[in-house]
């Protein structure tokens, strides 16, 4: 699984078998950082509004929303 994002609030989930995104997640705020779990099942998106959105890569469904950052979220990592 690979992911890409844009300042238009979109994150694209790619698979090796496709030459186009397998899934697109659209948010209302620009995405500034991305991270994917080691198993490729969850995507974290850090946004300009200080929110981190967690989405399932297979369905695009929001799993959780983390509020409270005072500034843009410019870096994310799973460990």
Image: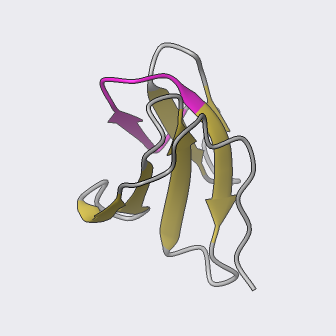
Is residue 3 visible in the rendered image? The answer is no
Q: Does the magenta stretch include residue 27?
A: yes
Q: How many marks?
A: 0
As drawn, which residue projects farthest toward the top?
Answer: 8
Q: Colour scheme of this structure image?
A: secondary structure
For the point 39% across and 24% down, the residue is: 29
Left or right: residue 19 compared with residue 57: right
- Where residue 18 sits in the image (x, y, percent)? 60, 43
For the point 53% across and 59% down, the residue is: 44
- Where residue 32 sits in the image (x, y, percent)? 64, 32
- Where residue 3 sits in the image (x, y, percent)? 65, 46
User: 22 or 38: nearer the eye?
Assistant: 38
Is residue 77 visible in the rendered image? The answer is yes
For the point 48% across and 13% down, the residue is: 8
- Where residue 26 sits in the image (x, y, percent)? 34, 30
As drawn, which residue projects farthest toward the front?
Answer: 70
Left or right: residue 28 compared with residue 17: left
The residues colored magenta run: 21-31
Quadrant of the image occupied by residue 73:
top right
Q: Does the magenta stretch include residue 13?
A: no
State which quarter of the image contains the C terminus: bottom right
User: 9 or 61: nearer the eye?
Assistant: 9
55, above or below 2, in the image: below
Left or right: residue 67 compared with residue 72: left
3, above or below 77, in the image: above
State which quarter of the image contains the N terminus: bottom right
């Amino acid at each position: 699984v690979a992911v890409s994002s844009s300042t238009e609030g979109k994150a694209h989930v790619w698979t090796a078998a496709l030459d186009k995104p397998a899934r697109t997640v659209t948010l209302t705020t620009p995405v500034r950082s991305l991270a994917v779990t080691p198993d490729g099942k969850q995507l974290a998106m850090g946004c300009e509004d200080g929110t981190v959105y967690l989405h399932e890569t297979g369905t695009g469904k929001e799993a959780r929303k983390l509020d409270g950052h005072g500034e843009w979220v410019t870096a994310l990592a799973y460990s």
